[in-house]
């Protein structure tokens, strides 16, 4: 029997430390009498900071497999975890502001958030289907509980119930697919699966069965059409603070799941899953952008906007080249930044007992707060893909890779759908700048919140003008590591 | 390549048909002689005392779910105890960590008052 050694523990050190600190944060919160939960919040951010430091200290392009091949530490997992920490840090800051505004401060928001982060880290580093599933469930269960945190609200309870049910179905599909793959290849280790799949015949029925179910499970978790039904209700029903967290950071984990399962594990079946992802991507972009136009609720609209962004993300992955994966990673990170900013503005517009989420609530924002209006303008232009904002480069990078593999019609369709989508982003801009304000309540907000929302807007603008550093990181991730592709 | 997916389509169709057929058979073959007494709600042979849609105490549920968590821990301890001699200190450490995490959860539920009946 091989026992794990120091090497194994070192590779998984960020997870071990975050798990320990998350438990400590839970205990700190229990004994804190502070109504503002400042200590809990600081401890949460400290945990994320420690995580960032640990990742940066160990950052390298070496691929280390640990714990008998169930866990992998490579540059992809490192970079993903870094972005997860940064995104979660910003999300927790917005969350605290929201909870203060609405007098709902509870420490559990942050501890559950930390456990969700831990789940995402495990997902990013999984090289075995059991590890992957473990991380996915830790993430999902934390998110279900977060959505249900506002117990007295019927809307939240309904959203949480739907999320839980559909999430459970998705997990079931995924497990079913994994069991099929296990039946066909005799292994759950993604490296061994890749070897076995490379030698299998392409019409191996069990293998294709497994692949279909795995793709369906991933599509559920990503919220890709036709597995998107939970997204609008959950986005609308959950407290905005929770929506902003679950809409943004876990997308990185979902990207990790796509890469680990489809590329690392089932890479040799690329011809098969490419077709499935094309269908998912086209449907997501079409339904997402078209249905978003009809929404009166901004959070619902952003949910459909997320669905269409997921379509773009899939475009990058389905190209099947390293550049394509890099473009998809870039797109995911950019989407996270834009989503955080847009929801951050919504958080600032709310006040106790009132969620500013109808289109009419945002009317004339320019008269009430020109600076906040400017940030929202940047976010909307960026999501619509208007140059020179960051979102344009993300779309551009993905489309370039799709054309590079010869799927020109797909790129054309994507462009058409994003032009349709531009309508509802620009409608928000029109409401902000050209309509009379119905709401006259002054917009307050603590100074950290103001600074963070402003810098969020500036990041989108500055990286839009100089996208090279961020894009460079994403490309470096995929050109230096060797993915197991047949 | 597309014909590879035909079995999956058939599989889904068979699944749907099976589900529908089983329910339909029960509906068609079962005797159906409804009358007002049969159709009305009752409670242990009596007229219903109150509406079924009411708020009820979730404390039983809470206690049950907390019990399950700590009951499952025993399910881990048994196989662990059997092979403890072979794995040795490492197993002891691993189980200690597992129990420590459970203790954190226990402290949490205690402090939150989940164990208090009144």
Image (cartoon, rainbow, N blue to C red):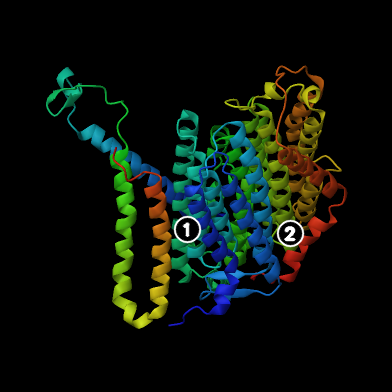
Secondary structure of the residue carrying tag 1 is helix
**Residue furthest to the left:** B45
What is the x, y in percent for residue A109? 54, 44
Relative to residue A359, is residue A78 depicted above or below?
A: below
Please say whether residue A140 is visible from this viewpoint: yes
The answer to whether A40 is drawn above or below residue A53 in the figure is: above
Quarter of the image for the N terminus of chain A: give it.
Answer: bottom left
Numbered mark located on residue A319 in the image: none
What residue lies at 49% left-to-right and 38% top-to-bottom?
A: A149
Element type where label 2 sits in the image: helix
Residue A326: mark: 2
Observer-nearest of A475 and A270: A475
Picture coordinates of residue A329 (x, y %)?
A: 70, 56
Q: Position of residue A425 (x, y in %)?
A: 75, 32
Of residues A395 and A67, the one drawn nearer to the viewer in this rendering: A67
Identity of the residue drawn at 57% across and 66% down: A265
- Comparing A124 with A170, the one in front is A124
Q: Residues within 10 Å of mark 2 (few under 14, many from 20)?
A: many
Q: Residues within 10 Å of mark 1 (few under 14, many from 20)?
A: many
Rendering quarter of residue A100: top right
Q: Which residue is mark 1?
A: A177
Image point 35% across, 82% down: which residue?
A: B86
């Amino acid at each position: 029997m091989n026992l794990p050694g120091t090497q194994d523990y070192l590779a998984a050190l960020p997870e071990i430390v975050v798990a320990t600190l998350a438990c400590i944060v839970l205990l700190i919160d229990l004994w804190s009498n502070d109504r503002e939960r400042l200590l809990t919040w600081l401890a949460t951010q400290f945990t994320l900071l420690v995580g960032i430091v640990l990742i940066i200290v160990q950052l390298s392009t070496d691929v280390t497999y640990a714990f008998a091949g169930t866990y992998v530490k490579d540059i992809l997992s490192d970079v993903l975890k870094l972005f997860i920490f940064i995104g979660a840090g910003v999300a927790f800051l917005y969350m605290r502001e929201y909870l203060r505004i609405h007098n709902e401060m509870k420490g559990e928001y942050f501890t559950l958030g930390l456990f969700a982060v831990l789940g995402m880290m495990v997902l990013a580093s999984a090289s075995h289907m059991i590890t992957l599933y473990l991380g996915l469930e830790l993430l999902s269960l934390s998110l279900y509980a977060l959505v249900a945190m506002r117990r007295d609200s019927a809307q939240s309870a309904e959203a949480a119930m739907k999320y839980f049910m559909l999430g459970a179905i998705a997990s079931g599909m995924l497990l079913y697919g994994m069991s099929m793959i296990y039946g066909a290849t005799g292994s759950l280790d993604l490296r061994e699966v890749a070897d076995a799949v490379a030698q299998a015949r392409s019409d191996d029925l069990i293998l294709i069965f497994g692949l279909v179910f795995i793709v369906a499970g991933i599509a559920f978790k990503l919220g890709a059409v036709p597995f998107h039904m939970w997204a609008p209700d959950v986005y609308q029903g959950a407290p905005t603070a929770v929506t902003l967290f679950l809409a943004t950071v876990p997308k990185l984990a979902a990207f990790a799941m796509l890469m680990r399962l489809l590329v690392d594990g089932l890479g040799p079946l690329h011809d098969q899953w490419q077709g499935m992802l094309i269908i998912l991507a086209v449907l997501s972009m079409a339904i997402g952008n078209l249905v978003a136009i009809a929404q009166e609720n901004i959070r619902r609209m952003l949910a459909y906007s997320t669905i269409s962004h997921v379509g773009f993300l899939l475009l990058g992955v389905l190209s099947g080249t390293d550049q394509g994966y890099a473009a998809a990673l870039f797109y995911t990170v950019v989407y996270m930044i834009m989503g955080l900013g847009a929801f951050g503005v919504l958080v600032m517009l709310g006040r106790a007992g009132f969620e500013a989420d109808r289109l009419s609530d945002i009317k004339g924002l320019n008269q009430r707060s020109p600076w906040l209006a400017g940030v929202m303008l940047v976010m909307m232009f960026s999501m619509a893909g208007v140059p020179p904002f960051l979102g344009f480069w993300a779309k551009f990078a993905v489309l370039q890779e799709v054309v590079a593999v010869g799927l020109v019609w797909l790129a054309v369709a994507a462009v058409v759908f994003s032009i349709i989508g531009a309508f509802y982003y620009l409608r928000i801009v029109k409401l902000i700048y050209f309509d009379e304000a119905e709401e006259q309540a002054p917009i307050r907000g603590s100074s950290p919140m103001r600074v963070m929302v402003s810098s969020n807007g500036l990041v989108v603008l500055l990286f839009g003008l100089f996208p090279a550093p961020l894009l460079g990181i994403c490309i470096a991730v995929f050109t230096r590591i060797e993915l197991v592709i047949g | 390549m597309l014909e590879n997916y035909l079995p999956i389509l058939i599989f889904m169709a068979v699944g749907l048909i099976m589900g529908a057929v089983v329910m339909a058979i029960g509906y068609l073959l079962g005797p159906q002689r409804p009358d007002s007494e049969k159709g009305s709600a009752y409670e242990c042979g009596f007229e219903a005392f109150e509406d079924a849609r009411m708020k009820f105490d979730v404390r039983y549920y809470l206690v049950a779910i907390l019990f399950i968590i700590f009951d499952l821990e025993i399910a881990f301890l048994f196989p662990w105890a059997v092979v403890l001699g072979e794995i040795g200190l490492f197993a002891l450490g691993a189980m200690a960590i597992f129990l420590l995490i459970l203790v954190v959860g226990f402290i949490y539920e205690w402090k939150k008052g989940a164990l208090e009946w009144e």
